[in-house]
Image (cartoon, coloured by chain):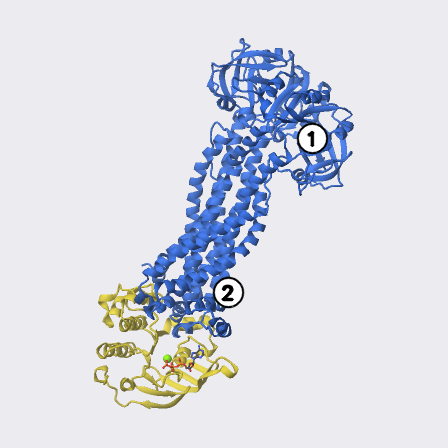
Chain colours: A blue, B yellow
Amino acid sequence: MVSPLDHKLLRDLWRMKGQAMAIGMVIAVGVGMLVMMTGLVTSLNETRAAYYERYRLADVFAPVTRAPDRLAGRLAAIDGVRSVEARVIGGALIDLDGIDLPVQAQAVSLPDLRNPRLNGVFLTDGRMIDRDRTDEILLLQSFAMAHGLRPGDRIQATMNGARRGFRIVGLAQSPEFLYTTAPGELIPDDARFGVIWMSRSALAAAYDMEGAFNEALLSLTRGANPAAVQEAVDRILIPYGGTGAYPLADQTSNRFVSEEISGLEAAAAGVPPVFLAVAAFLLYIVINRMVQSEREEIGLMKAFGYTNTEVGGHYFKLVMAIAIGGALAGCLMGIAGGRALIHIYIAYFKFPFLVFQLDPASFVTGVSVSILSASVGGMLVLRSVFALTPATAMRAPAPADYSRTGKMGRALNVWLDQPSRMVVRRITRQPGRMAGAMIGIACGMALCVSMITIYAGFDRTIDLTFNVIDRSDVMVSFNQDVSETAIFNLRRMEGVTLVEPVRHVPAILRNGRNSHRGVVTGLAPDARLNRALDNDLAEIPLQKTGIALSTALADILKIRPGDMLTVDVRTGRQPVLQIPVTAVAQSLLGAPAYMDLAALNRVLREPNRVSGAYLSIDQVHASAIYTKLQDMPTVAGVGLKSQAEVAFQTLMNTGAGAIRYVMGAIAFVITFGIVYNAARIAYAERSRDLASLRVIGFTRAETAFVLLGELAIVTLVALPLGGVLGYYLSFSIAAGFSSELYQIPAIFDPASYGFAAMVVIGAAVGSGWLVKRDIDRAELVSALKTRE
Amino acid sequence: MTRNTFSTKGLTKVYGEGRSAVHALRGVDLDIPEGEIVVLLGPSGSGKSTLLNIIGGLDRATDGTALFHDQNLSEMSDRELTRYRRDHVGFVFQFYNLMPSLTARENVELVTEIARDPMDSDEALAMVGLRERVDHFPAQLSGGEQQRVAIARAVAKNPTVLFCDEPTGALDSTTGRSVLNVLKDVNEKLGATVLIVTHAASQAAMADRVIHFADGGIRKVVLNEKKLTPEEIEW
Ligand SMILES: Nc1ncnc2c1ncn2[C@@H]1O[C@H](COP(=O)(O)OP(=O)(O)OP(=O)(O)O)[C@@H](O)[C@H]1O
Ligand SMILES: [Mg+2]
């Protein structure tokens, strides 16, 4: 037999189904997001690991200028090295019909007689190259797709200064090139960087590398010490121009994938708990009020001899039913959401297959966190259940004491009509309950404010990066570091209004145990096009000695102005420099480090060297300028800022950043849930009063006003409070979305607050309308007959 | 000699403190022998419900002792009081106090479920003439019908003592009489001690003992030589 208390439980749930569902939804979205995000992260990590393993991605990459093939044997003999692949790579420019600018590409050799031992390729279309045909190539699939190239097509490419024709025989993917970024740029773009695979002998011929290699790939045995291996590799290769072996973690494509995945991870760790906390709080308020309104029934049960535990258990079950129901719904939503999103991400990350894996731990975490938070709320409620004495049951419900408001009421009598007075008295008389509703709505406001602030932050990042920090139109990069005369040649071009030299020096930046493989950027003094700016967007004067680090970099290295930075230069003579940090610059893209160009050249003892230039051009001459640039032998690549901006926008809207839309939607759902709840509770508490009002002759509108007026006032008071909460919350959410790749600032943007307020008010109006419908429908007689 | 179900000494109850204190009971000395029907009469506000609450284990006295058999209710812990109510006491409250979200039958089951030796809930409802209405919710019942459900609920557990606070206040003479008959049955068949608070002085005629209450104290106790049956009572 089902116990009568369980009947009561079910009926109570049914009676408060709107509320229960609203709270359940809030819990569900919190849990759902947790399950979805952790599922995404686990699946992406698993898929990546499987992909890397299946195609034997190297653990260590060792670039070198020119090393004889026999060195490969010595590398293989290093302790901890499992296998070695020596290959030839080289920069190339691909000419495509209908595109002004040549596209940069990397040519990669494939062994002539066997499959590569490391860094295999996955053929998606066409066939492998024939080792006897030197003009046959494989092309990176994503690049080919971006340009509509297919097997059988022919392309022109310039390698080592010589222009040649090639035939595409197949399209391929590789775990090494999930993301391709043109040299000197930070944002990956499928269309603007290509990868060409061709036979080792053909490529060696093109780059004068017969009998030699310029990149060694190594895989390690289990338990090998990567640092020791890298050191050993460097000892062997540095005499041949080795620029330092680096681990997979520092490999461009992998680093990017890692950043994106950890971006998702951070969002998964940071945001759902906020939602769950809000849900727990809501549950507490609702159940607490329910217990208050059921005081007599609780007293009655106790009068019959039900123990505190039995009565408490009943209400606890109610809490649990909602919490567990919500959590289970959340798990299902999370699975469905994860399944839907994972395909988008798999395509985004260009994984050729999917290892879909839900993290069972996330279900456990999700469900137990929601049960736990609901329990905390439930426990607080139980205290008041225990405190009620059974004698309460035998007393008629005492009318709430409004006498304390008498004085104020008299003052207000002058200008308030009766219903308005009821509203004001209730709010002043029961500040505790009103505060509960208000804090709830403020939480909703805070969620909305912070999410909308984040949206504005993304726009801000783009604006700051492409309109404030970088004001150039074109970025030119040279084949290698060249003398400043190249700059004069650019200045002389017709239509070029401003040229600013820049030098990018690859380096490992170290501070104690923290290090970062990046680039030191040398900027011209009084730069106009690309500048180092401080937090107030004022230009940072670059000192004659010293380096300015971006905020992100300073955070990674845990370094402050005044500290000494170790710069382990990875080019030329590869000196190790000690340079004082003089300033922290604001940057929202990447983690740059800035130095005065002349100062940089001086410490490197390479005067008058530049590696590229920023150009400001007259758009009328754009096409002519591109053609001229293309014909300059020193120019390795030309990037348009407008293209970079589009690529960045795409990145933000498809990668980890895309989650912000999901979260925003969820924040709106939660906000509505909260406001609707507040309205329902107020109605439940007052349904008898409202019915009495109707009985004594108040109209429907007047009756509704008593309730909705209260809701309106509570909402209006909650808005500024929520604004303040949201201001602080937005910092932690912004941190969740920021990665090494780009940073999202939490900026105070009045429009965001206005919009969030509109959302909350909209939710209040919607909830008010729903409740008003119920007030209109309420049957007077039954409302009066029983106490509830 | 029959032993006393209840025996109180100097029972005092004060609500509130200081100037606004209400002395609901002012030292009540009372013995209620086992198996009797006792009627409490008295003006409104004289403390009848308060007395019932205290000896029913719902509330605690401010001062004085209240014995149930040999157990001192004043010294019981909350847990013991709960046990006492659960095992021995049936209540019919002045304000019905049904659970609005439970049907008539479920309201009765609420009590039978935790009782030691309950009767069938439908049987209890049949006793008060509500066999046909077992599946109705309180909101679908009239005031008198709700009261009868409350009585069925109180007797269904086969209580040792039955407290009825104005059980017939809302009833017409026919149903009122049948309710009183139920109480009489419980008293005679189960040997339960029955305490009835009422404003209808005529009902005192069916009691073994009539206690006249006024201003928080007992004015007089009258023992009936000859009890009337509910049918013989004037309404
Ligand atoms: N919780 C309380 N707080 C303060 N005073 C109370 C409380 N309960 C009862 N009283 C007061 O105690 C006195 C006795 O109340 P009680 O309910 O026992 O009267 P009663 O005899 O049952 O009256 P009625 O016949 O009207 O039910 C009354 O003056 C009442 O106002
Ligand atoms: Mg009374």
- Graded by Cα atoms within 10 Å as few (under 14), some (14 to 19) or many (20 or more), the crowding at tag 1 reads many
Residue A569 image point, x, y percent: 72, 28
- Graded by Cα atoms within 10 Å as few (under 14), some (14 to 19) or many (20 or more), the crowding at tag 2 reads few
For badge 1, the amino acid type reads Thr
> Where's ligand 2: which quadrant?
bottom left
Q: Quarter of the image containing the N terminus of chain A?
A: bottom left
Residue A151 image point, x, y percent: 47, 16
Do discs 1 and 2 belong to a common subunit? yes
Residue at 59% across / 31% down in the picture?
A: A255
Residue B122 image point, x, y percent: 26, 66
Q: Check the residue under mark 2 and report the chain it is in.
A: A
Residue identifier under label 1: A521
Q: Which corner quadrant of the image does residue A421 belong to?
A: bottom left
Residue A517 against residue A535 in the figure, above or below: above
Front disc: 1 or 2: 1
For badge 2, the amino acid type reads Gly
Residue nearest the observer in this picture, A173 or B12: A173
Residue identifier under label 2: A432
Mark 1 or mark 2: whose residue is earlier in sequence: 2
What mark, if any, has residue A52 been given in the picture? Answer: none
Is residue B48 shown left or right of residue A661?
Answer: left
Residue A115 image point, x, y percent: 54, 17
